[in-house]
């Protein structure tokens, strides 16, 4: 495996684990504000990000590469209202999309077709993540200022259920 591709993928493990921390922090914020449905949504989001780290880890191992775990930064966000975590989540997903694109570009540069094929799942996943984040912002903007609307949104978020990502489920 090309050294640059390896380093980017190994670093992505750390970035995904940071994402899990960030989403746990958002879950804590919503739980402490009495919105347990939103807390549930972000707890599941944190689990997905941890799973993404495992998928990258498994890829390195499957290619005979050692995984080097790095320190995970502490999230430093403080939220003043219900919209702010949603906006931070969207910006963070855009950042992760850029990271995945950088890995893909590095793999393309060295004609690492296996890595590119592996990354295709993440490219689709990031598209979905950004769409979901934008949808949550739209709903909060439309209905979040009304107590009944916020209650219904929270109930909707409470209904989210965790599912194992297909690369981990063996699909």
Image (cartoon, rainbow, N blue to C red):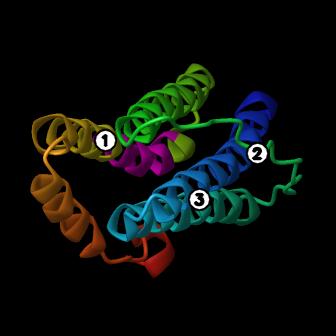
Could you tell me which quadrant the N terminus lies in?
A: top right
- From this view, report whether residue 34 is shown above or below residue 8: below
Question: Residue tagged by mark 3?
Answer: 24
Element at badge 2? helix
**In this rendering, position of residue 13 left or right of residue 36:** right
Q: Which of the 4 image quarters holds residue 171?
A: bottom left
Q: Which residues are magenta?
A: 116-127
Element at badge 3? helix
Question: Residue tagged by mark 1?
Answer: 133
**In this rendering, position of residue 77 left or right of residue 122:** right
Question: Residue tagged by mark 2?
Answer: 10
Crowding near pointer 3: few (<14 within 10 Å), some, many (20+)?
Answer: many
**Residue 141: image x %, image y %?**
18, 34
At x 53%, y 37%, the residue is 79
**Residue 160: image x %, image y %?**
28, 72
Residues at discs 3 and 1 in contact (Cβ within 8 Å): no
Residues at discs 2 and 3 in contact (Cβ within 8 Å): no
Report, in whole angstroms, how far the alpha carbon at label 1 lies from the one at label 2. 26 Å
């Amino acid at each position: 495996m090309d050294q640059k591709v390896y380093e980017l993928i190994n670093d992505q493990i750390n970035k995904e684990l940071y994402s899990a921390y960030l989403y746990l922090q958002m879950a804590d914020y919503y739980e402490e504000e009495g919105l347990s449905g939103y807390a549930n949504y972000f707890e599941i989001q944190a689990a997905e990000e941890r799973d993404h780290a495992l998928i990258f880890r498994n890829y390195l191992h499957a290619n005979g590469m050692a995984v080097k775990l790095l320190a995970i930064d502490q999230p430093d966000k403080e939220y003043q209202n219900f919209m702010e975590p949603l906006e931070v989540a969207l910006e963070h997903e855009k950042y992760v999309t850029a990271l995945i694109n950088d890995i893909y570009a590095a793999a393309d540069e060295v004609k690492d077709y296996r890595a590119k094929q592996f990354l295709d799942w993440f490219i689709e996943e990031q598209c979905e993540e950004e769409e979901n984040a934008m949808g949550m912002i739209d709903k909060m903007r439309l209905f979040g200022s009304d107590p009944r609307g916020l209650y219904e949104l929270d109930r909707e978020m409470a209904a989210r259920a965790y599912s194992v990502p297909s690369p981990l489920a063996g699909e």
